[in-house]
Amino acid sequence: MKSIEDLILLFRLKGLKITPQRRAIFEILNKNGSHPNAEDIYKGLKKNMPDVSRTTVYNTLKELNNLGAISVVRNVEEGSIRYDPKTEKHDHIYCLQCSRIIDIENGNQEIELSKEKAQGFKIVDYQITHIGYCPDCQKTR
């Protein structure tokens, strides 16, 4: 993830204000490798900033994603978008029981689909998420 100072500079270069709430969101993402969703971030902020709104969180995450400073982890669990401050290409492992997501370094392997397999799609990005049970959850199953 980019440093907090890099994110502040990126926002300022785009003419976006740096508010205490946005700075706190940057800090949460910078310290959090768990791929939080917007609600997780909102709850974390609410503890120290009771007046923060969900809209502020969602709008800041949208801007960070638009600027390429975070990425969205897709197809993990229905109805929940998770955010990844690590934007370099990598895979994930997802635990079906505790919902933990772990990064897997894949050495920037490129996946190339044949024209037949792509079925006319123009591929612009891809994500691979391996799904299973983490060691802790295996013990409790």
Image: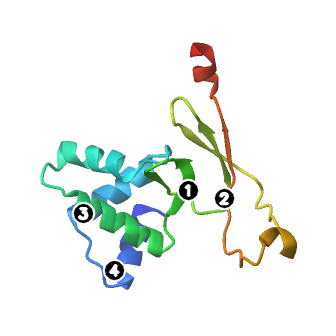
Q: Return the residue at label 3.
A: 55
Determine whether, in the image, residue 135 is placed left or right of residue 69.
Answer: right
Q: Is residue 14 above or below residue 108?
A: below
Label 4's element?
Answer: helix
Q: Of circles 4 and 1, which is in front?
A: 1
| Pointers 3 and 1 in contact (C-beta within 8 Å) | no
| Three-letter code, disc 4 | Arg
Residue 7 at x, y = what percent? 41, 69
Q: Badge 3, how many Cα within 10 Å: few under 14, some, many 20+?
A: few
What is the spatial separation of the Cα atoms under label 4 and label 1, in whole angstroms? 28 Å
| Three-letter code, disc 1 | Arg
Determine whether, in the image, residue 34 is placed left or right of residue 4.
Answer: right
Q: Which numbered marker is on residue 12?
A: 4
Q: Of circles 3 and 4, which is in front?
A: 3
Q: Badge 4, how many Cα within 10 Å: few under 14, some, many 20+?
A: few
Q: Badge 2, how many Cα within 10 Å: few under 14, some, many 20+?
A: some
Q: Earlier in the sequence, mark 2 or mark 1?
A: 1
Residue 109 at x, y = what percent? 80, 61
| Three-letter code, disc 3 | Thr
Q: Residue at x 66, y 58 (%)?
A: 127
Label 2's element?
Answer: loop
Q: Residue at x 29, y 56 (%)?
A: 24
Q: Of circles 2 and 4, which is in front?
A: 2
| Pointers 3 and 2 in contact (C-beta within 8 Å) | no
Q: Residue at x 28, y 63 (%)?
A: 22
| Pointers 2 and 1 in contact (C-beta within 8 Å) | yes
| Pointers 3 and 4 in contact (C-beta within 8 Å) | no
Q: Return the residue at label 1.
A: 74
Whether residue 1 can be seen here: no
Label 3's element?
Answer: helix
Between 139 and 6, the one nearer to me in the picture: 139
What is the spatial separation of the Cα atoms under label 3 and label 1, in whole angstroms? 21 Å
